[in-house]
Each structure stands twice: as structure tokens, then as C-alpha cells.
Amino acid sequence: MHLPESYIHRISRYLDESALVHGEVKADILDHMCCQIEAEMEQGESFDKAFEQSCQVFAPEDLADIQADTLYFLTIKRNRMLLKTIFITAYASVALYVMGFGFLDFFKFFLADQPTAYMLSFILKTAGVSFFCFGFLPALTLYGYRRALRLISS
């Protein structure tokens, strides 16, 4: 069974009056409401009665929650990956930098060649600073920017 265009427009106007902002979420809910109304109409209900029942299931205050939950679950994997990147780069940069200082004495003691010890220490410190500047800081900035956008949009 397919709903006439006028019925679909009525359902769409109902959703336009709700707090739905994202078109994809609105389209999905419109599809769910149409399917539910079609199922009720196949059981002998009138469109008006089926529409009322569907409006009770998809109440305006619930639609905002549905939209927020949908957006959360769509972005959670990306946020989790970004947080992992932040923690890994932070740990790696600090570990490399500290090893550069700590191993300097170790290198000087065990290596007869002092310039090699200083060079290895310099390489570790440079790697630590590079991880911090080009890994941790950009990832942290991106995470903060995304959080700010979410706070502004909600």
C-alpha cells in the first residue's frame, strides 16, 4: 500500500513543526511514520486515526531525542578514534622526550663515543616534540573544535 501524496505532505508538515533539523533524520522518521500508518490502514483504520496513533508514538518532544541519539551513534566511532589518537600521541611524545633525557647518561656511560650518545638523545627528544606538535596538538584541537560545534548546534 502506498500513501497518497497529500497524506505524505501532512506527515511532512507535522515533522517540519517539530525540532528536527537534519534532513536525513527527518526523512527516516517520515518513512517510519508512513510505514506505521500504512500498516494501521491495512488493518482497517482511517488515515486520521492512524496518523493520531503515529503522532503519539513520534511525539515532538521524543523526536528531538531521537535526532540527538541518532547523531550521537553516527559520530561515536569517529570520536572514539580521535580520542585514541590523542592519548596515544600524548603518551608517545612524553615517553620519547623523557627517554631522550634519561638515556643520555645511559648512552654516555655505555657508548665510548660521546657524540653518538648526544645524537641518539637528540633524535629521541626531536621525535617526542614532533609527535607532540604534529600529532597530539592537531588531534586535540580538532576534538575541541568538534565539541564546540556540537555545543553551539544543540
Image: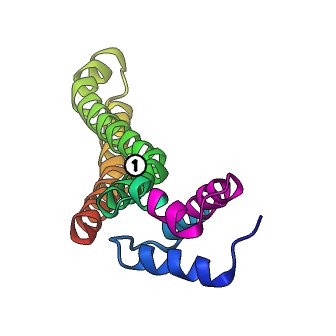
Q: Which residues fall within the magenta stretch? A: 32-53
Name the residue at 27% across, 71% down. Answer: 153
Q: Is residue 91 above or below residue 70?
A: above
152 displayed left or right of 21:
left
Residue 147 percent across, percent down from the top left:
27, 59
Residue 81 percent across, percent down from the top left:
45, 44
Residue 48 versus residue 123: which sits nearer the camera? 48
42 displayed left or right of 85:
right
Residue 129 versus residue 67: which sits nearer the camera? 67
Task: Give the quarter of the figure containing the C terminus.
Answer: bottom left
Name the residue at 28% across, 28% down. Answer: 99
Identify the residue at the far top of this view. Answer: 110
Quarter location, residue 118: top left
Residue beneath disc 1: 79
Task: Give the quarter of the figure containing the N terminus.
Answer: bottom right
The secondary structure that dominates the magenta segment is helix
Residue 101 versus residue 89: which sits nearer the camera? 89
Q: Is residue 45 magenta?
A: yes
Q: Is residue 43 above or below residue 21?
A: above
81 displayed left or right of 94:
right
Name the element at disc 1: helix
Residue 24 versus residue 37: which sits nearer the camera? 37
Residue 18 percent across, percent down from the top left:
35, 72
- The amino acid type of the residue labelled 1 equals Asn
What colour scheme was applied to this rendering of the protein? rainbow
Name the residue at 39% across, 39% down. Answer: 84
The number of numbered discs placed on residues in the rendered structure image is 1
For the residue carrying disc 1, how many other residues have a C-alpha within 10 Å: few (<14), some (14-19), or many (20+)? some
Residue 100 percent across, percent down from the top left:
28, 33
Q: Is residue 88 magenta?
A: no
